[in-house]
Amino acid sequence: MDWFDTSDYWLGRLLFKEGLAVLYFCAFLVAANQFRPLLGDDGMLPIRRFLAGRRWQGSPSIFHLHYSDRFFAVVAWTGAGLAALAVVGVLDRLPLPLCMLGWLLLWALYLSIVNVGQLWYGFGWESLLLEVGLLAVFVGNLHTAPPLLTLLLLRWVLFRLEFGAGLIKIRGDPCWRDLTCLYYHHETQPMPGPLSWYFHRLPRPLHKVEVAGNHFTQLIVPFFLFMPQPVAGGAAAIMIATQLWLVASGNFSWLNWLAIVLGLSVLPDGFWEFVLPISAPSDIAPSPTWFVAVVVAFTVAIVALSYRPARNLLSSHQMMNASFDPWHLVNTYGAFGHITRTRREIVVEGTTDEHLTPDTEWRAYEFKGKPGDLWRRPQQFAPYHLRLDWLMWFAAISPSYAAPWFGAFISRLLDGDRATLSLLHHNPFPDRPPTYVRARTFRYRFTTHAERRATGAWWSRTFESDFMPPASLRQAP
């Protein structure tokens, strides 16, 4: 069917699915590595307790049928293994029905995890991965031509992702309108990367150029995604370049990488033939009639479900990173509508002293990603997601973010829980757990050029207040 199949995006589809498979693998790996201290039976927010008060209709998940830590591990590692098969191309070499089933299973397994993940999975990129992952079911395999309708649906996701992010900024913090937000953002973002200090120290006029370029990319360029080639491909290339700039400047899990993967699906094969030593095969088969019918029905459903997200884009009360159904089918996106001007960090410390005195020696726990040690350079983790570190950033903004889980976190430090300690970069008490743990809030800022040369430190900090007074197992929070 000439109207349905397009042979111009075979390479774009291949790169889209390969990139998506890598991100699926990363997401399942994060789940397998972190679920026990966060969500396990001895975790801070146990899944079993969550399920006791939920119905399947409100949070569809395989774990409503059965939950144990061992079963969760099986689900997470099964997803990782299936994603690895997709990365090496096994899934896409299967017959079309089996290929679709494999990608559908990836989506269903990750949906099951997200819907019981509670606060630890309350990020927009979870819904984005699920929405894009479901679309991947309907893009065909290596032996069929890419369906035009599904490619257009991918562009619709990319449009909402970029345009929604642009609108939430321009409607939100005044610093986006006066082009000054990047005076602060590289320093105060949730998890700076190894180059963030350098980005923060760029000249302020260049920061204004960055913001203006961001507005152009997010508010103007998305409309060109639906234009004929090469205009659509050019728009996608601009978005990819902008996202790579964001990748270099900080850690935002797989959000930027998913935007890049979506952009790859827009680039026509004519572009890729100049940069990659591969080309589309000449024996691509047309889509079978049953597949055409399934994709058309799916497209109609997505168009109908797009009403509320589209209305949200036009609303003066635009929601950010919201799902309108428990299946995360068509969502709304956006980030950093408000920029924090001051970076606050919660520093967690312990001591082995039996009695607290003014001379008590306190030693700090070091997290893997969030700032702590002033001389430790921020690391690159994205697309890997450090869930505890991100929630610590929110907790420093408002203690209410920490209320459901912070007390349990402290209790596990006092108990020397190995699973919890595995989430940290450094445990200052390798021999025995501390007798007391406390948390204090500091104001952090990047050092100046002069301070950096003189001390070698990346950060400077000043004490602000106690976040949590010293606690022991006898009075654990």
Image (cartoon, grey):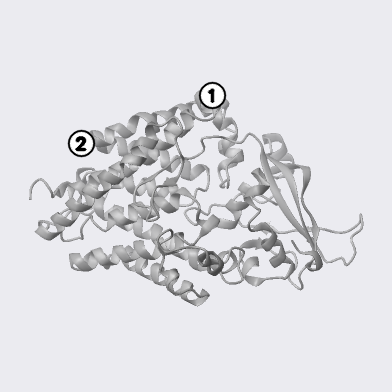
Name the mark nearer the viewer: 1 or 2.
2
Q: Amino acid at mark 1?
A: Pro
| Residue 90 relative to residue 43: left or right | left
Determine which residue is flagged by label 2. Answer: 229
Residue 174: quadrant of the picture = top right
Whether residue 128 can be seen here:
yes
Q: Amino acid at mark 2?
A: Gln
Which circle marks residue 205 in the picture?
Answer: 1
* 147 versus 333 height, above or below: below
Q: Which residue is nearer to you in this view: 425 or 414?
A: 414
Q: Which residue is nearer to you in this view: 195 or 255?
A: 255
Neighbours of disc 1 within 10 Å: few (<14), some (14-19), many (20+): few
x then y, percent, for residue 205: 54, 24
Q: Residue at x 66, y 53 (%)?
A: 403
x then y, percent, for residue 419: 62, 70
x then y, percent, for residue 299: 22, 49
